[in-house]
């Protein structure tokens, strides 16, 4: 159901963009959707957000799941069937929410790419991604193989970083084409292939935006590492217990 809701959202977004296309230029639409895609990618790349995500969103789901399971175990014999039914529906809703949240981000992110390369190419890329996910799921849940998850995450992070830099450069170029921002050329001869493959163009706006994106992601990563090593405040009851223990000794 989460995948179905994601698919419905995709068609809704496509319909909205088609309606907007009747009122504004294609350059404006590409600039706007590209900006949304970069915001989504920055959120994904932001290590501070990951800290909030893992400790907040996922812990919330785990807590709710535990509450539902505990409600089944503590239910009386006369109410166990009703509690099971409610708990089952709750677990289903949690699963749908988890899948749809990721799918919604992907829908927004892919709209910009769809406008640039077409729906067919986006569908081919999505199909390939689903195949890779299925293979990973098979080795994890069916074959019970231990995969190098850390290396996979590092590799994925590097790929996302490269994609972010390219998208930021392309986005600045699209915003300049839509006359959203000015263009200030720099006196440096940048080869055409740099613009084709890495979206690096000879203007200050592109260079500054790509540098800012790199500093933002790398800076948030190291800031999160520093925050992780900060000493945590002890809970009041633990502090008092330690004081009592010290006095006793």
Image: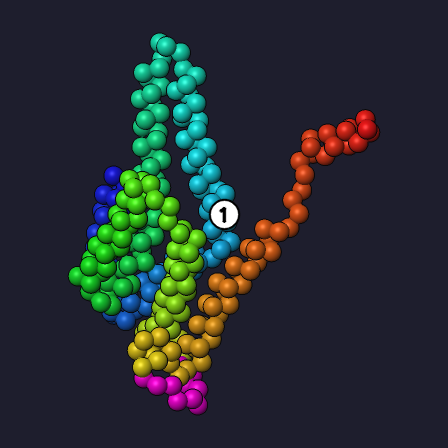
Q: Quadrant of residue 86?
A: top left
Residue 82 is a magenta residue: no
Residue furthest left in the image: 120
Instruction: Please identify the quadrant where the C terminus is shown.
Output: top right
Can residue 175 be seen in the rendering of this structure? no
Residue 79 image offset from top left, x and y in percent: 36, 13
10 Å crowding of disc 1: few (<14), some (14-19), many (20+): few
For the residue pair 28 and 110, the one nearer the viewer reads as 110
The colour scheme used to paint the residues is: rainbow
Residue 184 is a magenta residue: yes
Tell me if residue 96 comes above or below residue 84 in the rendering.
below
Which secondary structure type mostly characterizes the magenta part of the structure?
loop
Query: Which residue has dot 1 on it?
Result: 52
- Bounds of the magenta segment: 183-192
With 27 as the anchor, is 222 left or right in this view?
Answer: right
For the residue pair 204 and 26, the one nearer the viewer reads as 204
For the residue pair 229 and 86, the one nearer the viewer reads as 229
Q: Secondary structure at mark 1?
A: helix
Residue 200 image offset from top left, x and y in percent: 38, 78
With 233 as the anchor, is 11 left or right in this view?
Answer: left
Residue 121 image offset from top left, x and y in percent: 20, 63
Residue ID at (36%, 70%)? 166
Residue 13 image offset from top left, x and y in percent: 25, 54
Residue ID at (31%, 28%)? 89
Residue ID at (42%, 56%)? 151
Tell me if residue 222 comes above or below residue 95 in the rendering.
below
């Amino acid at each position: 159901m989460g995948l179905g809701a994601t698919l419905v959202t995709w068609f809704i977004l496509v319909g909205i963009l088609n309606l907007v296309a009747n009122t504004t230029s294609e350059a404006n639409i590409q600039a706007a959707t590209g900006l949304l895609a970069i915001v989504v990618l920055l959120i994904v790349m932001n290590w501070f957000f990951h800290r909030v995500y893992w400790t907040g969103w996922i812990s919330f789901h785990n807590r709710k799941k535990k509450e539902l399971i505990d409600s089944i175990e503590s239910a009386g014999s006369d109410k166990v069937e009703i509690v099971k039914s409610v708990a089952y529906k709750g677990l289903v809703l949690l699963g749908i929410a988890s899948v749809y949240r990721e799918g919604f981000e992907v829908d927004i992110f892919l709209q910009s790419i769809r406008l640039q390369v077409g729906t067919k190419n986006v569908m081919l890329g999505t199909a390939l991604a689903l195949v890779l996910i299925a293979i990973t799921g098979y080795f994890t849940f069916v074959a019970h193989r231990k995969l190098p998850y850390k290396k996979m995450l590092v590799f994925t992070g590097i790929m996302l970083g490269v994609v972010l830099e390219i998208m930021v450069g392309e986005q600045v170029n699209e915003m300049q084409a839509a006359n959203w921002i000015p263009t200030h050329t720099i006196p440096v001869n940048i080869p055409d292939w740099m613009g084709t493959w890495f979206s690096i163009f000879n203007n200050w706006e592109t260079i500054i935006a790509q540098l800012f994106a790199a500093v933002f992601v790398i800076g948030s990563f190291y800031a999160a590492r520093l925050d992780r090593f900060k000493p945590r405040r002890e809970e009041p009851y633990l502090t008092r217990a330690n004081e009592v223990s010290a006095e006793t000794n």
